[in-house]
Amino acid sequence: MSRTTQLELIFWVFTAIITAVVLLPILTSVENYPFLFINIVYIVAAVTVTRYLFLLRHTFLARRQRLKVAVFFLFIPFVFYLIQELNHFQVFLDEEGLDAVVGNLPYEQRNNMMDYIRNQMILFGVASIVASVALPFRLLASVWRLRNRGVV
């Protein structure tokens, strides 16, 4: 197994652990959490895209020019999807409130869980959006550098 593959596997395990640790309090306290899928997408995207942004040289994308160009164009609708889902979450907060999600919890735990859900969704949502906006430019610079200078 090559070092790049080993490093990629280690980072995916690390991402899975972070996702599990962040979502564990929510999944153990809240029944039928409606934002589970997008929450997982935000956490995985924030960690993975940020990793590719700063450690592109050590990823499988490093020397694959066509794949970098394809990822560049795939991230355009992906960024819009992330923004749309964050907007959906904010609209849900404005219209329903997080009480609709954590309504079955005891009163003492309700406010803490509401703050936790809102803060981690906004943190990972904004981090994934910012990283997903920056990554295509990093990929474009990498394609240009590799083509003209031979450096990733």
Image (spheres, grey):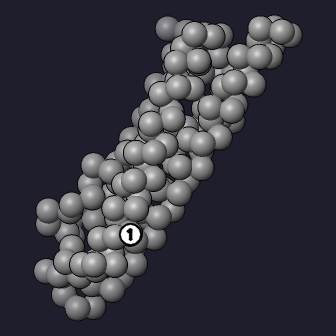
Please report the residue visible at 54 percent of the width from the left and 14 percent of the height from the top: 67
Residue beneath the point at 38% across and 69% down: 90
The residue to which callout 1 is attached is 90
Residue 122 in percent (x, y) is at 47, 64
Report whether 127 appears left or right of 94.
right
Determine whether, in the image, residue 143 is placed left or right of residue 91: right
Q: Classify residue 110 by image quadrant.
A: bottom left
Q: Nearer the viewer, residue 33 or 84?
A: 84
Front in this rendered view, residue 29 or 68: 68
Task: Indicate whether 35 appears above or below 59.
Answer: below
104 over 123 or under it: above or below: below
Point out residue 24 in the picture as x, y percentages from the top left corner: 30, 59
Quadrant occupied by the C terminus: top right
Residue 98 visible to the viewer: yes
Q: Quadrant of residue 25?
A: bottom left
Instruction: Name the residue: 44% across, 32% down.
Output: 12
In this orientation, which residue lies closer to the viewer: 108 or 73? 73
Q: Residue at x 14, y 66 (%)?
A: 31
